[in-house]
Image: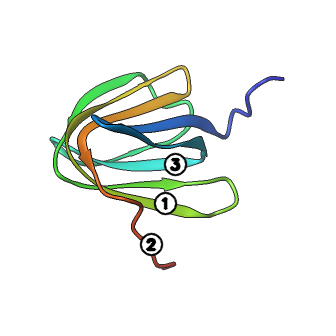
Amino acid sequence: MMADKSTMQVTVVAADRPVWSGTATGVTVPASEGGMGILPNHEPVLTVVNSGRVTVTEPDGTHHGFDVEDGFVSFDSNKLTVAVERCSAEVASAEE
């Protein structure tokens, strides 16, 4: 099965455990140069993650939020990996 070009595979991992994995239409990360949004088919990126919130949006519109500290994000070939030292349990995200 071909991957849908409007989605990407996302994996969020902390040093001590896997946190979340699935398909997303967009992710925002607290990058070292400020908040960064990553969409499917983004150019490859490797950047440092500061403390802050990672937000993942699933294709059905569901949002997942994770408070993270110290790590990096890597994106290539529609696969996004967020690897952090510490990550909270999922925090509820209110619809805007």
Nearer-the-camera pick, 43 or 92: 92
Q: What residue type is labelled 2?
A: Ser
N-term-proximal mark, 1 vs 2:
1
> With respect to residue 93, does 17 lie above or below?
above
Q: Are marks 3 and 1 in contact (CB under 8 Å)?
A: no
Secondary structure, mark 2, is loop
Q: Mark 1 points at which residue?
A: 64
Secondary structure, mark 1, is strand
Label 3 to label 1, Cα distance in Å? 11 Å
Could you say where residue 31 lies in the image, as x and y percent from the top left?
23, 43
For the point 30% across and 37% down, the residue is 16
Could you say where residue 25 lies in the image, as x and y percent from the top left?
59, 47
Label 3 to label 2, Cα distance in Å? 15 Å
Q: Do the residues labelled 1 and 2 touch (CB within 8 Å)?
A: yes
Q: Name the residue under label 3.
A: 26
Q: What residue type is labelled 3?
A: Gly
Q: Mark 2 points at which residue?
A: 93
> With respect to residue 11, does 90 lie above or below?
below
User: In the picture, residue 46 is in which quadrant?
Assistant: top left
User: In the picture, residue 14 is in which quadrant?
Assistant: top left
For the point 48% across and 60% down, the residue is 64
For the point 73% across and 28% down, the residue is 3
